[in-house]
Structures are given as structure tokens and as C-alpha cells.
Amino acid sequence: MKRIICIILCCLFLLSVPMAMGTQAAGGKLVAITFDDGPSGYTTTLLDGLKSRGAKATFFVVGNRVNSYPNVMRRMVSEGHQIANHTTTHPNLNTLSGEGVSSELNTCEQRLKTYGGAQTYAIRPPYGNHNATVRARANGPLILWSVDTLDWQSRNATSVYNKIVNNTRDGSIVLLHDLYSTSVQGALNAIDTLKAQGYEFVTVNELFRRRGITMQKGVAYSSAYNNGVTLPAASAPKAVSVAISDVVGGKKVSLATATKGADIYYTTDGSNPTLQSRKYSGTITLKESATLKAAAYNEVWGAVTQKQINVPFADAPKASLEGKTLTLEAVKGTTIYYETNGSVPTKKSAVYTDPITINKQCSVLVRASGKADHVIHYTVTKHGALFTDVPLKSWYYTAVGEAEHRGIMKGTAENVFSPETEITRAMFVTALYRMSPDAEQKFADSGFKDVTKKWYRDAVNWARANGVVRGMSDTEFAPNAEITREQMCSMLHRYLKVYKLQGARQKRAALKDMHTVSSWAKKDVAALYEMGLINGMGDGIFAPKLSATRAQCAKLLVAVDDMK
Ligand code: NI
């Protein structure tokens, strides 16, 4: 009996050699290399090596390591490798209860989903141990191996290389661990040798797909040797085409690929689509400008289509206020909805047709085809000026209204004050000049060579003639430089002296950063501080070198103007 079996086996062995050679010539030789127990600090080197060799691998990662290597995990997925389940804490599953097994497998799977999306994840039970409970609880196929490199034992790149090269055959699954630099080096060297012998390095899923085998969950597989079937490599699906049309409130975007059955994934934040990206399931409405990237996926990724889609805001109306009557001239094709009670308007709000009576505020929603919804908040100052950027509840609402009304500061554009914008030296000197009793007077040329614009020239001439400014040098004023808080104090203090507006000084706790104030500005900062015109940024810090905003300037100058 024994002898007969032996003879049959020998015959089969002899026959299998030429048969295998025949099929190898016809199809490619496939091998799946797999790495367990990672990711680790060596995985990046491994990914670099796989990328430069055009080789795909399968990573059976340990769940509790996954979140420490988010970039490595993302790279595995984006570079076409397979990520798979090696449990959460690497226990011997045969020693656990059913619930214990499920917990180990499901927690790891949840973490994999963060990177690979919803799919069936292959499982490699630690030590290859599985029993009936493990098989019943498994949510994917159990993947064992046919080539054991014993890399964890040898820690020797040459030994790892020899184990792979000497034992791999068409359809092998090779077991490695990306915890050791020797495993990474041995594997990459072996890939070079086996590629030269005609091997193609594929993921486990791809190996079984091309052998025509549909893996079943809870069933163990350790190889997919050549069975006479070698399907062609999955070919990349056709690129995604993008069609854009206008809808009210934005752009409607339709995506399509000519490849049947391929799914389309897309992003709008400029990143490349992955399996975690949004899956296209019907037209998308873009309500703001975006960089759209889309790609089709069908076992492998198609080329990424990129399109910049601009969604400008619906055009603002021209707004004007007469007393309490607000008139809005809508741009053609826009619809204006409004609220005058402080709430944000919606499509259900009243539609603007004729001038409306407002008290302190009016908010409008402007809508148009192909444009983004545009919300504009109009506020009215105490003196009846209309601004879109001076909120009723802001700390500077009153100061801006006064500064505008008294002619100290003007808006930067129609209905725009730019309160949060840094103020330049030219703007500040102009405001001081407008506030001064000499506002209408002309003075001799300042001699500053960089004073080139008409709108601030008279102000600079006035400031130089009265000693309010000294300039950066005799010939340079730096009109467009942002004014620092200490420069502002210096100019203002000199202004107060010129017009004899010295306020009462009170002793206050010294500013903590007085030592950082430039020597030429120390007296000025101290004087304004003791007059109560300036305060610290909080905690007694003055921050002399910081620039000042237009709102801060309005508040300060109105306070000075009140000293008259
Ligand atoms: Ni392991």
C-alpha cells in the first residue's frame, strides 16, 4: 500500500515539472509578499523600495499600532498595497472566547476602515492559529503562508533573501515582518532577483482574483499555486469626465467614467482621492470654489482628473441710505432676500423689491445662478453712515461711527470701513490732520521724497511743519509702512503738545514691557498711558512694536478729539 502511494506521488512530481513550465510561459508568475506585525519605523523604507520596483505587497497590521502611523497607512493604500487584519493586540486567538475573538478582529477592522474604507479585510491570525470559533467569527478569509522566511529568528538579510528566492514558486504567499531592517533589505533584494525571473509581485487579493478563486470568509488559504488559470492584470479604469452647469447658489457637477462597474471617488480639498474619499452617487452641488479631484476605482485606480471650479459670490447690490430708507440696486439676475431684525436671511425671508425702512441694521442674502450665496450685513452708525463690516455688537461700532461722522476717518470703499485692517503711517497722519484745527490749511512741502500720493500729501506737510512727525530720516517718511503702536503714541503726544491738549496725568502701575519701548518713544508712551488714552493689551503688556488696526485708531482718536 505504502509503496503504491509512493510511486503515484513520484509520478505526479515528475509530471508536474514540465506542466508547470508550460503554464508559466503562457501567464505571468505571481507571488504575494506579506508583512506582519507593523507598521514600524522601517515600513517607510520598505514602501520606498516597493515603489521603485513596481511591487505590491500586503500588510497585516496590528490594530493598536495603526494610529501611530497614519501617514504610513495612507501611503500603503494610495500606493496600491493591500492593508489587512492581524488582530488588535496580537493574541493567540485559539485561547480566546468567541466574544474575545470578535473584539480582537473588529477593533482592528474599524481602524483599517479609517484608511481603506468599507471592504472585506483579509485576516491573518497571529501564529497562524485558528480553530472553529475563529473561523466562525472571521469577517474575511484567513490568509496563511506557504513560504516562511523565519526572518524574526535569523535577523539576517542574506538568510531572508535565500529563504524567499529558494522557496518561492508561482502562487506562493511569503511571510515576512516589517519590524526588522534585515527583513526589509532581504525582501527588496529578493524582489530584484525574482522579478528578473519573471515574477510579478501582487497583493493577496489580486493573487486569488487572477487565479480565478473567490475567497470565502472564515476559510484558510496559504497559497494560490498555478492551477492553469491566470487572468490578466486588472486594467486601470478610464479617466473621469466632469460636466459643470449652473444652479442657483452654486455649480452642479456630474462625474462619469466609461469603464462599466467602476466606482468614482472624489475630493474637493485638493487631496488625491482614496477609498476613504466620498464615493460619487449622483450630481454634486458646489457652493464655493474648490479644486475637484476625481478618479475611478476598479481593483486598481484610474488616472486622477483635476478641475478648478470657481464659484464666485453673487454680486452685491449697490446700497445707499437716505435717513432710514435703504435702497438696494440689485445686479441683474440676482434675487435679494432680507431681514431687518438682526436674523440671518434665508430663501424664506422677504424678497427685496422696493426701498425699505430700516432702523440700525439690515441683512441680505443675494442669490444668483452659478454663484455662491452671498450674505451681507448692513449696519447704520449713530450718525447714519452705512457699513457692511462694522457689526452692531463690535467694541468699535460707536468709535467708528464717531470717527466717520467727525471726518477723522473715512471708509476704505463704498460702505466699507476695514476696521480690522492695519493702519499705515499715511492713513494715521491723515486722520490726525483731519482732526486738527488746521485741517483746511496748506503747509510747505515736507521734503520727504517718498510722499508721492495726493491723498495724504497735505497731511504730511502739515505734520512736518508742526513737528508732529520726524520721518524715518530727513527725506523718508515710509507712508505705506504699518504704523507701530509706539510710533502712534509719539505722533499723538506731539500733536497734543502742539495743540495744548495735555490731559490730567494719573499714576498707574507701570507697563511690564516698558523696557522694550524704543528710547525715543518712552516719554510719549508713558504720557499717553498716564492720561488714560492707551491701555495695555491686557496683563500690563503694551506691545510697542505691534501694528495698530483702523478700529483701534478710531477709538484712540475719538478719545483725543473729545479732549478739545
Ligand atoms: Ni504576527
Image (tube, rainbow, N blue to C red):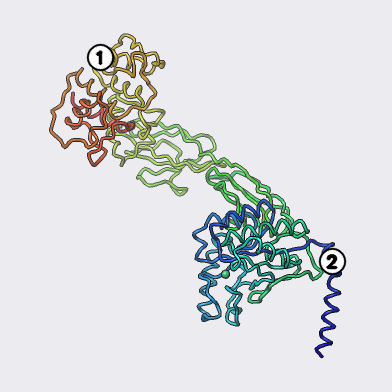
Q: Pinpoint residue 520: horizontal percent, then vertical percent.
A: 25, 23
Q: Secondary structure at mark 1?
A: loop
Which numbered disc flags the more N-terminal residue, 1 or 2?
Answer: 2
Q: Secondary structure at mark 2?
A: helix
Quarter of the C terminus within the rendering: top left
Relative to 139, 532 lies left or right: left
Relative to 103, 12 lies left or right: right
Give the residue number, with chain letter if any, for mark 1.
Answer: 466
Q: Pinpoint residue 199: horizontal percent, then vertical percent.
A: 75, 60
Label 1 lies in ligand 1 vicinity (Cβ under 8 Å): no
Judge whether 564 appears above or below 54 on screen.
Answer: above
Q: Pinpoint residue 531: horizontal percent, then vertical percent.
A: 17, 30
**Of the residues shown, which amino acid type is indicated by label 2?**
Met
Q: Which mark is residue 21?
A: 2
Relative to 465, 190 lies left or right: right
**Of the residues shown, which amino acid type is indicated by label 1?**
Asn
